[in-house]
């Protein structure tokens, strides 16, 4: 899917004129890929890298453009597993045009960074800034989900919440790898600021992006360490909850077996003969009371032994 944009009054809006100075290729089809190669001079390998989620971040220069492959967080749909993944985005800066190539249709120019865009190099940096800030938002969501799972897993005997923690930890590993890769490229960009043609204020914005990326990486490391500790602790809690339930069931089974044993040995016919001088309603009420008392005493006795 191809969308054309332009910078108008400091904002990125859908372009009314053609050719649009800003083009976004979201999940490009074969025809659009061919156009990217022939018209814009992007080679097949670089184009494939921009669409490959496993591709590490990198910065390259050619005669026609500067190419940045950066890892971004994928949109989280909240269905199925709690797994946050990453994707690759290709940003190609030409003297008179900016191209964004991405594997899925997401709003590239949404958020607080796109209200005072100066020019194409400034937009180039702000796309990166928005991607890094997206990580921070996802890390906050992961932290909220972790807190919610903590409250549920304390009394749960299911593996569902434990598996959710495993998925979140796996997500943080993805994020750590992506943020680390992005950090290396951002450092390279700082040394190539002149070659990138950054406008006034561009190096300062790039420094802010590097700082925020480092903060995201540090936060992801902390959350990953916390989750690793939680998984071990919560596995023990789930096992302990299951053991407590088994002990409770064991006490109930024994409490039922003991009066049942005496009832089967004595038999109802013997009890009827022993209490034939009593009204049958009173006789059976006494029998049930004795059985209940035996069961209760047995249950309490078993529970007391289990606590030792």
Image: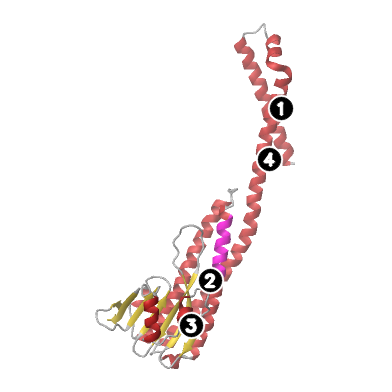
Of badges 1 and 3, the one in the foreground is 3
Of badges 3 and 4, the one in the foreground is 3
Task: Report helix, strand or loop for mark 3.
Answer: helix
Task: Report helix, strand or loop for mark 1.
Answer: helix
The answer for how far apart the CA atoms under marks 3 and 4 are is: 62 Å
Q: Earlier in the sequence, mark 4 or mark 1?
A: 4
Residue 15 in the image: x percent, y percent? 27, 79
Q: Earlier in the sequence, mark 1 or mark 3?
A: 3
Question: In what quadrant of the picture does the N terminus appear?
Answer: bottom left
Residue 179 sits inside the magenta stretch? no
Work out whether 155 lies above or below 121: above
Task: Report helix, strand or loop for mark 4.
Answer: helix
Query: Residue reaching furthest left?
Result: 16
Q: Earlier in the sequence, mark 2 or mark 1?
A: 2
Task: Specify few, some or many for label 1: CA neighbours under 10 Å numbering under 14, 14-19, or 20 or more.
Answer: some
Task: Report helix, strand or loop for mark 2.
Answer: helix
Residue 128 in the image: x percent, y percent? 43, 79
Q: Which mark is residue 258?
A: 1
Q: Earlier in the sequence, mark 3 or mark 4?
A: 3
Q: Are marks 4 and 1 in contact (CB under 8 Å)?
A: no
**The one of 100 and 157 positioned closer to us in this rendering:** 100
The answer for how far apart the CA atoms under marks 4 and 1 are is: 17 Å
Of badges 2 and 3, the one in the foreground is 3
The answer for how far apart the CA atoms under marks 2 and 3 are is: 24 Å
Residue under label 4 = 247
Task: State whether residue 170 appears in this view.
Answer: yes
Task: Specify few, some or many for label 2: CA neighbours under 10 Å numbering under 14, 14-19, or 20 or more.
Answer: many
Q: Which mark is residue 45?
A: 3
């Amino acid at each position: 899917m191809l969308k054309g944009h332009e910078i108008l009054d400091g904002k990125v809006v859908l372009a009314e004129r053609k050719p649009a100075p800003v083009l976004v290729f979201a999940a490009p089809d074969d025809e659009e890929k061919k156009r990217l190669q022939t018209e814009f001079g992007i080679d097949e390998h670089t184009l494939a890298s921009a669409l490959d989620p496993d591709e590490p971040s990198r910065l390259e220069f050619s005669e026609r453009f500067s190419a940045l492959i950066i890892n971004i967080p994928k949109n989280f749909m909240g269905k199925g597993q709690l797994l946050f993944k990453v994707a690759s985005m290709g940003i190609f800066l030409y003297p008179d045009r900016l191209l964004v190539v991405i594997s899925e249709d997401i709003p590239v120019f949404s958020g607080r960074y796109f209200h005072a865009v100066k020019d194409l190099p400034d937009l180039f940096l702000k796309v990166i800034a928005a991607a890094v800030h997206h990580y921070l938002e996802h890390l906050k969501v992961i932290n909220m989900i972790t807190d919610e799972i903590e409250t549920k897993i304390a009394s749960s005997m299911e593996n569902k919440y434990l598996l959710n923690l495993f998925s979140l930890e796996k997500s943080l590993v993805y994020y750590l790898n992506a943020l680390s890769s992005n950090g290396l490229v951002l450092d390279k960009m700082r040394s190539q600021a002149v070659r990138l043609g950054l406008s006034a204020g561009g190096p300062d914005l790039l420094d802010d992006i590097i700082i925020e990326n480092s903060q995201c990486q540090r936060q992801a490391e902390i959350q990953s360490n916390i989750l690793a500790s939680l998984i071990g602790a919560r596995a023990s809690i789930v096992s302990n909850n299951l053991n407590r339930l088994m002990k409770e069931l064991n006490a109930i089974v024994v409490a039922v077996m003991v009066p049942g044993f005496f009832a089967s040995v004595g038999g109802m016919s013997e009890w009827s003969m022993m209490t034939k001088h009593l009204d049958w309603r009173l006789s059976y009420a006494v029998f049930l009371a004795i059985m209940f008392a035996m069961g209760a005493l047995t249950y309490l006795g078993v529970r007391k032994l289990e606590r030792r």
